[in-house]
Image (spheres, grey):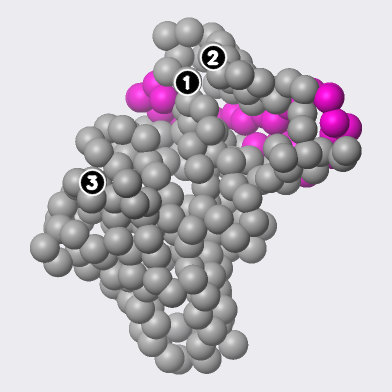
Amino acid sequence: EAGVTQFPSHSVIEKGQTVTLRCDPISGHDNLYWYRRVMGKEIKFLLHFVKESKQDESGMPNNRFLAERTGGTYSTLKVQPAELEDSGVYFCASSLFNQPQHFGDGTRLSIL
Amino acid sequence: QQQVKQSPQSLIVQKGGISIINCAYENTAFDYFPWYQQFPGKGPALLIAIRPDVSEKKEGRFTISFNKSAKQFSLHIMDSQPGDSATYFCAAPGRYNFNKFYFGSGTKLNVKP
């Protein structure tokens, strides 16, 4: 069984540019989550999809972040325009209903 | 809201020793506390989890101890091996949302040969 896949693994962009991160969950997992870890700090929840619906987006930092999950399969997280404080590792996770979350390897985002 | 405090930030243990990492949480209506293990360049992988109808859960060399009244839980790694060197995260579910996990800040474990 393929795990959670994230693209790209690394992204380096300049402040003000746009970046789109992609996550492919484990097949059959209706629940999809986005998390972020800023250097040395805790892994912070961003949002939770159930199929294509946003169940909880209370962790999204501001309106420069937009997450979508059209068709309830893969998800994208767009940052526009990117700011320096957006640098960090963005993790995606997926799960079955009320089951453990499985994480991808993350996208390391660097804003210059 | 929920806050999870994890300590220590880093830990050096000799091969064969016991590694102990502690976590404390504030509030949750749900009883499920996982520990994740992360190797460099990889995502966190579920290591072991406890549903505190028991105060302890053991899987091989890894044991979770849970103290519900103190709102604390800890990970013990017995007979620590160099291959255990990784960053460990504890997590607790949110107060109102089981699927919204709050993570500790991580403990970087280095097991010396």
Q: How crowded is mark 1: few (under 14 residues within 10 Å), some or many (20 or more)?
A: many
The kind of secondary structure element at disc 3 is: loop
| Chain name for mark 3 | A
Asked if the residue under mark 2 is in contact with the one under mark 1, i.e. CB atoms within 8 Å, the reply is yes
Q: Name the kind of residue labelled 2 in the image.
A: Lys
* Residue under the point 43% across and 91% down: A17
- Give coordinates of residue B93: x percent, y percent: 41, 34
Q: Which of B62 and B8 is in front in this view?
A: B62
Q: Name the kind of residue labelled 3 in the image.
A: His
Q: Provide the residue designation for mark 2.
A: B57
Q: Which of A15 and B10 is in front in this view?
A: B10
Q: How crowded is mark 3: few (under 14 residues within 10 Å), some or many (20 or more)?
A: many
Q: How crowded is mark 2: few (under 14 residues within 10 Å), some or many (20 or more)?
A: some
Q: Provide the residue designation for mark 1.
A: B50
Instruction: Please provide the residue range marked out in magenta.
Output: B6-32
Judge left or right: residue B7 versus residue B60: right
Asked if the residue under mark 1 is in contact with the one under mark 3, i.e. CB atoms within 8 Å, the reply is no
* Residue under the point 48% across and 26% down: B49
The kind of secondary structure element at disc 2 is: strand
Q: Which residue lies furthest to the front in this view?
A: A1
Q: Provide the residue designation for mark 3.
A: A29
Decide if residue B3 is in sight here.
no
Q: In this view, does A53 lie above or below A102?
A: below
Q: Which quarter of the figure is the C terminus of chain A placed in?
A: bottom right
